[in-house]
Image: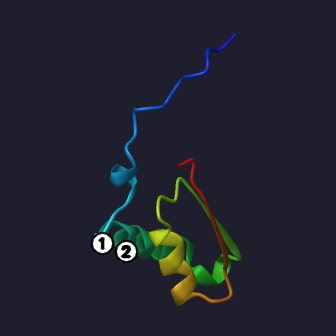
């Protein structure tokens, strides 16, 4: 049986909030070059923090359905 790991106290709220979106912009540029946004209909960001990546995708591609999932 696998023991459930207690993550309480391991992550702080302030560590999830980011004011510098440049890493997300760089990741978005990589996704655009790799897949081509014309080929993407939906995008799920698991561990989306405050949603910067899905915001960038949606603001540049209104036709793509985006969703973010965050534990915290």
Q: Are marks 1 and 2 in contact (CB under 8 Å)?
A: yes
Expressed as whole percent of the image width and height from the top left, the position of residue 14 reads: 34, 53
Residue identified by numbered label 1: 22
Label 1 sits on a secondary structure element that is helix
Count the numbered circles shown: 2
**64, above or below 46, in the image:** below
What's the distance in space between the residues labelled 1 and 2, CA to CA?
5 Å
Label 1: how many residues lie within 10 Å, few (<14), some (14-19) or many (20+)?
few
Label 2: how many residues lie within 10 Å, few (<14), some (14-19) or many (20+)?
some
Q: Nearer the viewer, residue 8 or 49?
A: 8
Work out which quarter of the rendered image holds the N terminus and state it: top right
Expressed as whole percent of the image width and height from the top left, the position of residue 72 reads: 53, 49
Residue 3: image quadrant is top right
Residue at point 44%, 73% (across, down): 28
Residue 10: image quadrant is top left
Q: Nearer the viewer, residue 35 or 16?
A: 16
Expressed as whole percent of the image width and height from the top left, the position of residue 53 reads: 48, 70
Residue identified by numbered label 2: 25
């Amino acid at each position: 049986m696998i023991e459930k790991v207690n993550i309480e106290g391991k992550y702080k709220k302030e560590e999830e909030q980011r004011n510098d979106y440049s890493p997300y912009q760089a990741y978005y540029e990589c996704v655009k070059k790799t897949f081509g946004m014309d080929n993407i209909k939906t995008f799920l960001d698991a561990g989306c923090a405050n949603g910067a990546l899905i915001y960038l995708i949606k603001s540049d591609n209104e036709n793509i359905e985006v969703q973010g999932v965050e534990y915290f």
